[in-house]
Amino acid sequence: MTRSLLSFVSIRMPRPFGVAVFGLLLLVFAACNSEPATQAPPSAEVLRDQTVETLRGLSSVSFEITHPNGGTDMGGGLMLNTVEGVALFPSSARMSAKGVVQRIAVSFGIVQTNSTTYFSGPIGDTWRVVPPESLPFDFIGMNTSVATALANASDITVALGGQVNGKQTFLLSGAIVSDDLQGLVPAADSGLPLTIEAWIGQEDGLPWKVVLTGTLIGSDPETMVRQLDLGDFDEPVTVEAPISLRLFEWSMAAMDHLSAAHSPSGNICMTNSCRIIAMLAVSCSLAPMTPSDSRACPGMHHALRSGWAEMGRSGQHQEARPPEQRPSRSG
């Protein structure tokens, strides 16, 4: 290619002009194939302090944890390989995970909302509440835990880290102990040495990747590697309890509302009218279900009217209409 360009320049153009054009072409070619410009790294202490402050100030992040050379033993023969999700600090997180049980690939879901932890899988997709300490990770405290580990790291060094997600980075490395990560891994043992590496964006100062090497829990080999990839920093995130449990709670609330409002004995929920409300709440949309707001989703109004009508016929309620349709008493 270069030879043909040189022949073109020498034959078709006056020599001085041709040499100038050829030189310009070489400069353009070199610019198109060169690596993006990098900055000289700051001191390790300055970069560490800036990164700690950035981590503690995050409001949300997306994350993925992988195990390049193994997995986390969750007990019962379940080996956790990957976890991917979003975290809203400091209150909630939502994630999906993949693992292996007796060489069978499985997947499960996890939702953390304040002090409640929901879990589904690995067999079936039914959600259930589990103790928070039953999980190997606590992603609600992920940012502060990693920040603490970096803040307490010793023998820290800094170097050019290459590109991560298309961004030039600095590589911050240091030695930590497992205690510093108990916010992220509550079951972490005490006093175990690890290394931490963090790839920090040169332009944005964001921690795009963190790698932990060493033993965190008793079942880990000394060579265990956990890689944490981060992104979507401070993006809007909504984390809610799983839909099936929310609908169950709304149906129970609807039944409680009917009992408290219309039954002196509190036993209406044994009647068909109360079952109508419960079934409708479970089969309806995500909108909050209460008898006082029957317009929350299509069909709710009709079912509520039927329920009140049945209560009226049974003598448990004097009117066969929802409260919002009763005639005004004024005037």
Image (cartoon, rainbow, N blue to C red):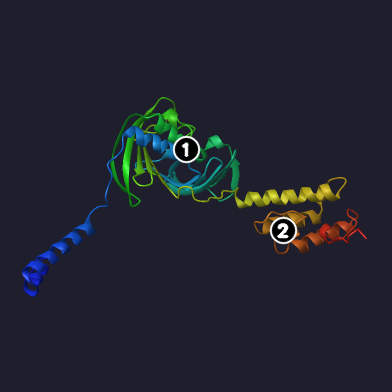
Q: Quadrant of the C terminus?
A: bottom right
Amino acid type of the residue tagged 1 in the rendering: Arg
Q: Residue at x 73, y 48 (%)?
A: 252
Residue 45 occupies quadrant: top left
Amino acid type of the residue tagged 2 in the rendering: Leu
Question: Which element type, helix, strand or loop, lies under badge 1?
Answer: helix
Q: Nearer the viewer, residue 13 or 262?
A: 13
Q: Position of residue 156 (x, y in %)?
A: 32, 31
C-beta proximity under 8 Å, tags 1 and 2: no
Q: Position of residue 266 (x, y in %)?
A: 84, 46
Residue 303 visible? The answer is yes
Q: Quadrant of the N terminus?
A: bottom left
Extreme right residue here?
A: 331
Question: Which element type, helix, strand or loop, lies under badge 2?
Answer: helix
Extreme bottom residue here?
A: 12
Residue 97 visible? The answer is no
Q: Which residue is disc 1 drawn over?
A: 56
Residue 319 occupies quadrant: bottom right
Disc 1 crowd rating (10 Å Cα; few below 14, some 14-19, many 20+) is some
Q: Which residue is disc 2 drawn over?
A: 280
Q: Nearer the viewer, residue 313 or 213?
A: 213
Q: CA distance from mark 1 to mark 2?
A: 44 Å
Q: Up-down: is 280 above or below 181?
A: below
